[in-house]
Amino acid sequence: QQIPADANFHSTSFSEADQPRVLITGGLGQLGVGLASFLRKRFGKDNVILSDIRKPPEHVFLSGPFIYSDILDYKNLREIVVNNRVTWLFHYSALLSAVGEANVSLARAVNITGLHNVLDVAEEHGLRLFVPSTIGAFGPTSPRNPTPDLCIQRPRTIYGVSKVHAELMGEYYYYRYGLDFRCLRYPGIISADSQPGGGTTDYAVQIFHDAVKHGRFECNLEPSTRLPMMYIDDCLRATLEVMEAPAESLSMRTYNVNAMSFTPAELAQEVLKHVPEFQITYNVDPVRQAIADSWPMNFDDSNARKDWGWKHDFDLPELVTTMLNFHGSESR
Ligand code: AKB
């Protein structure tokens, strides 16, 4: 039975009008720094704390509050939440698909044990909690073209298994304790000024750098591998929109979101329109290829569009123009 949204939330001493006090974990990954600067524009610089176990580069340190947090250390996490009066938590710490297969025990610790700590601290302190999931939460027995929100999920990577676990645990805490858990399944995210690390969709970020710098790119997936993708600006906006959506508009707590789908060959064709000498070659990584072959080709995000008005801005041509402009201006 569903507990009415908001029924069980812990009261805090803040009025509704107050800005959220935000903590971002895993803040030095592909998305954290961009998310922090996006949220700071909305909620104020000092209301958004970026955190990681690594030392930040100077420009990150200077751009707003940064703090050490280890999600595997429950007391450390609780101390940060209490001392900073955190009300919203964005949990980005995770090992991605390819790197997770190379280090399963670390991926299990970070992606599963770390999530348990985050869920507990969020429940204990009445936080609104965002956890990103992924197209990687599906597997070879899921419908791949298109993949709906609700279908068979039997992923074959530790990353995927941990993300299905996160979706189910978050929803369990929502139904059982009224935790305000919100989750989006991201496609491959393409960012200009931050690098992904150890993913299967990383080729679609690296290609732009190499096209501008070298005029060629060696791709580690086959030319016909179709995967859902999104430009980072759309991803950050989707994340804020689902966090700000009124609880009653959410018919579920885990949504697919998408913008486009393309293959390496199609992406290369689009790059060629701007970089006439561009050449792509293929040197397939069997681990990444097997992962990509088990993932959705097209992602059905109609529920997100219907429930809270999701709409992407960037299709393939705008994505390619934006990415090449960024790298072009950087190399000039
Ligand atoms: C990966 O490739 O592992 C990630 C993802 C799609 O979740 N970018």
Image (spheres, helix red, strand yellow):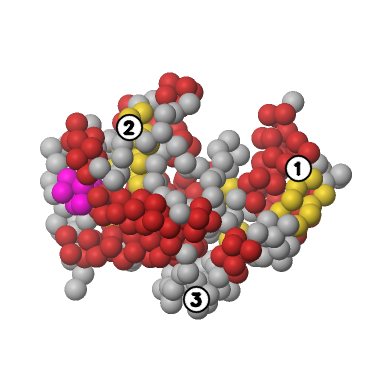
Mark 1 and mark 3 in contact (Cβ < 8 Å)?
no
Q: Which picture quadrant has residue 225?
A: bottom right
Which disc number belongs to residue 15? none
> Residue at image x 36%, y 28%?
66
Report the amino acid beneath label 2. Answer: Tyr
Q: Which picture quadrant has residue 111?
A: bottom left
Crowding near the residue tagged with mark 3, few <14, some 14–19, many ≥20 C-alpha atoms within 10 Å: many
Mark 2 and mark 3 in contact (Cβ < 8 Å)?
no
Residue under label 1 = 211
Crowding near the residue tagged with mark 2, few <14, some 14–19, many ≥20 C-alpha atoms within 10 Å: some
Is residue 188 visible in this depiction of the protein?
no
Q: Which residues are magenta?
A: 120-129
Q: CA distance from mark 2 to mark 1?
A: 36 Å
Report the amino acid beneath label 3. Answer: Ser
> Residue at image x 23%, y 35%?
80
Residue under label 3 = 142
> Residue at image x 27%, y 36%?
21
Please say if 57 is above or below 22.
Answer: above
Please say if 214 is above or below 282.
Answer: above
Count the marks: 3
Ligand 1 is within 8 Å of the C-beta of the residue at disc 2 = no
Q: CA distance from mark 3 to mark 1?
A: 34 Å
Ligand 1 is within 8 Å of the C-beta of the residue at disc 3 = no
Mark toward the start of the polypeptide (3 vs 1): 3
> Residue at image x 35%, y 40%?
24
| Quadrant showing the C terminus | top right
